[in-house]
Amino acid sequence: MDNIGATTSQIQLLVEAGLLDAPHPPQIVTAGGEPCPPDLWRALAAHPGVTAYDTYGPTEASVDATRAEMTAGSTPVIGRPYGSARVHLVNERLEPVPPGTAGEIVIGGPGVGRGYLNRPGVTAGVFVPDPFGAPGERLYRTGDLGRYTADGQIEFLGRNDHQVKILGQRIEPEEVEAALRGHPAVTAAAVSAHRLGTDRRLQLVAHLVMAEGQAAPDHDSIRDHLAGRLPAAAVPALLVPVEALPMTPGGKLDRRALTVPDGLAAGPSPHRDLVPPRTGTERRVAAVWQEVLGITGIGVHDDFFALGGHSLLAVRLALQLSKEFGTRIPLAHLYTASTVAGQAARVAELPPHREAPDGRSVVPLGGTPGERPLVLVHPLGGTLFCYRDLLDGLTAPFEVYGVQGDVGGAAGPPATDLAALAGRYAGELAPVLGDRAPVIAGWSAGGVLAHELARALAGRGVHAHRLVLIDSHPQHAQAAEDTEDTEAAEAAAADLAALDALRDRVAAQGPGALLGADDADRLFATLGVDPEEVAGLDAATTATLMGFWRDMLAGLTAHRPAAFAGPAELLLARGDGNGPVDDRAVIAAWRELTGTLTVTRADGDHFQLLRRPWVKAVADALRGPTGQTGE
């Protein structure tokens, strides 16, 4: 047989059965119908006597619309338009997306069908006028996602209706599957989302066909492999070994048949090297974790965030640990001690019955002692957990400090006055920095606060080496100053009033009072807070956080920034592919407020910038064009 064309799953079965080892293998192999896994791509590309192609195209567009030749050293893509097909990557408004940004794959040309028989409503939703073609031509909206590679080919990213939201992040199961298949111990992988644990939180489950000789997944090895390639939220909570992935009669993955064994649905995947709590303190810490996370079977080396924890739950954890041990547990402990063993050791170092907060906002976050200081300033939420992936990905040597907010509301001036708040932070930070010139950075509202902190430090004789503003927008405050009756000012006032009115109700009724509020969607969007994370909190934690959010929002609205005379870099997110981002007002505002301003744009949206793999652009900005020394 000289030429074989079949679905990708069927081709993989043939290759595993020895197709390429036969005395006379086929000269041409064409796979299609589903994404090509990296191991199959490599095997076909490496055979000198075989020319292999990966094709893509739905029936609605007369099947094949793109084609890619599998070559040695390349990675799986679906290639470029094939034949008479025209293929575009667009946002929701059918506008082209820039290279590297995910967009919906739409297909035009003479192969596009006329619609579905006797289904006019469905037809109208996906067979739409073609803005790139002649009058009367139509596009087919596939519902598939892709992005352009550096050489102009299309990388397939999965279905937009397969997306799941984990810890506030949009996750593409196919991207996780591709990363899993890149591990040498995994032959095939599928990812599903299920509600696990006593609180029924949505978590990812990986169904893995292990390589020969691998009886069970090496959880640490696989998670370490994924951690360097995916955001933390995309690392599956459960790893389930299976003999084979379920397939439909047509030879495609049957996602509806991806289930979780009953014995694993109550908690995280058990580690083969699980170490149970060994001391009384570890047992008490683990019991608090179990209550906060809603899971069982926690070992002393498990990571709070790997088990589904997030920044808001970390605040609740600190409050619950403080209650359990009768002494105030600083939130800062969780930045550098995120395991049961690490937290138990920190608790043992604390004096008993320490009711009052220590008042410190500056916390060490690691790095290389004696190197140039890097100061990361908290955003509106008050904590520093948003910088976790950034700290893991820093390539330049820094001694890193964080400036955290008083989310407990018990120490220092309120966040309603950003200048006074920055002055307090500068007074605490200046003795730590000494005569060293720091790089100061802040994401989102943290950029506005970092800018004010740089000014306050300059007033104390400490001059910043550089200020890095990570997708930070100052113009809303200026707009409110120019026109008191603008929609922005009215919206800010409405948000403040809503938070004031809701806080007492939340304290009495729990987070449901906030989640069910009429203006909840607007509030969460303004605060940049995921409602699913709030849903896992208790009443006291939610009310405490709302007080800090309210003060920060009031401080941002009233803030009138003055100029910082030093150099600054503004790193702007290109957006989520839903249309071009008009950032001219942001750039103009920061240009007036800094000595010199360099503007850089990076792939990803506002929240993705601090997550893998997009966070690399932030790490590069912190390092600077010639390294962090600036020489």
Image (spheres, rainbow, N blue to C red):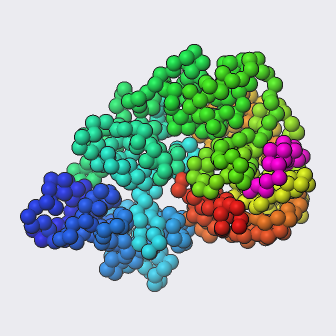
Q: Main secondary structure of the magenta part?
A: helix
- Nearest the viewer among 547 and 280 is 280
The answer to whether 112 is drawn above or below residue 102 in the figure is: below
* Image position of 132 with respect to 428: above or below: below
Q: On the picture, is 435 further left or further right than 629?
A: right
Query: Is residue 9 found inside the magenta-colored segment of the image?
Result: no
The count of marks equals: 0
Q: Quadrant of the C terminus?
A: bottom right
The residue at the point 76 percent across, 55 percent down is 438
Residue at coordinates 57% horizontally, 64% vertically from top-left? 603
In the rendered image, which quarter contains the N terminus? Answer: bottom left
The span shown in magenta is 420-440
Q: Quadrant of residue 123?
A: bottom left
Instruction: From the viewer's side, name the closer residue of 457 and 219.
Output: 457
| Whether residue 605 can be seen here | no
Q: Is residue 466 visible?
A: yes
Q: Between 469 and 585, which is closer to the camera in this rendering? A: 469
